[in-house]
Amino acid sequence: MGTNKQGEQALVVAYPNSLRHLQQLIMDLETCAKNIGKKTLFGNDKFKPAEQKILETLKSCAIGLALDGYLSQDYGKVSMGQVLATVNTALNEFRLVYGNWPLAFYFWDVWYEQQNSIVNNNIPLKQYDDTKSFVLDPTPVSNNIFYWYESEFGIGNKLTKLFLYSHEIQRTDSPSLGYKVLHTHPREQGQSVPSFVSDTEIEKPLVSRGQLESTCPKCGVMCSAQADALSYFSCGKCKHNWWQRL
Ligand SMILES: [Zn+2]
């Protein structure tokens, strides 16, 4: 998306995990800026959904920036204010490389200013798939939420249903202990595959008396299901449900 190849290479080195999310953010910002005051054919606002997309992408940016060492990986302790400030610092470097996206950066400056005046800096960053409460929900999240589970055949994500087979991942200790994701098969459309999954996000299977225990990836509550090749979990607290392989 840029024309400055050397500058872009420097960003690849500095932001290995967050680069593509920050690039996506720049594109989202551009879309949002172009939709100010616009309506769809049916009279619906075009700006709100575009802004919602920014919030979603900001979460992916936060996860990536944490993997790259710019934010704590302890998401329960990361505040929205910290995320915005860290993204802002990153974008100040990106704007030097992506000079052909002036509208996106102009929009960011205005939007960032506005968010900063709304957002209380102590509001913790909610889980990254929970876009609606990203900005305004002040409920603290558990520090011990696992988005992934380990199975005999690989690792599975309880939120996105993504499953990575053993041959698609490789042990690594960089940027921290976890799995590097190797070249994978094409996934369902729109399903994004991370380049790295940290051990801190992966829950080991715990089976006792025929029951498989697993923490809910949304609210952190311990759930259990009959241990089977494929177990179905439905969280009693938040109603989130997911399938898990043994
Ligand atoms: Zn739950």
Image: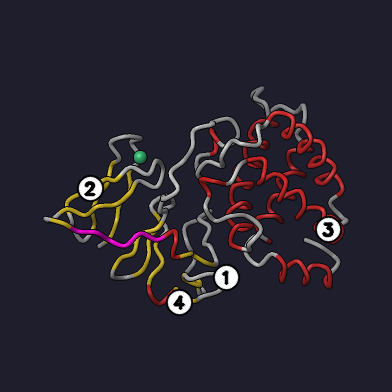
Q: Which residues are magenta?
A: 202-207
Quarter where residue 15 is shown: bottom right
Quarter where residue 123 is shown: top right
State the CA–CA distance, disc 3 to disc 2: 48 Å
Structural crowding at the residue carrying mark 4, measured as other residues with C-alpha within 10 Å and reported as few (<14), some (14–19) or many (≥20): some
Q: Can residue 205 be found in the magenta stretch?
A: yes
The reply to whether the residue tagged 4 has its Cβ within 8 angstroms of ligand 1 is: no
Structural crowding at the residue carrying mark 2, measured as other residues with C-alpha within 10 Å and reported as few (<14), some (14–19) or many (≥20): many
Q: Badge 1 is on which residue?
A: 175
In percent of the image, x 84 and y 55: which residue is there? 95
Decide if residue 128 is on the left or right side of residue 232: right
Which comes before the other along the chain, label 3 or label 4? Answer: 3
The reply to whether the residue tagged 1 has its Cβ within 8 angstroms of ligand 1 is: no
Q: Badge 3 is on which residue?
A: 98
Element class at badge 3 = loop
Where does the image place residue 66, in percent across and percent down from the top left?
Answer: 60, 57
Which comes before the other along the chain, label 3 or label 2? Answer: 3
Residue type at mark 2 is: Ser
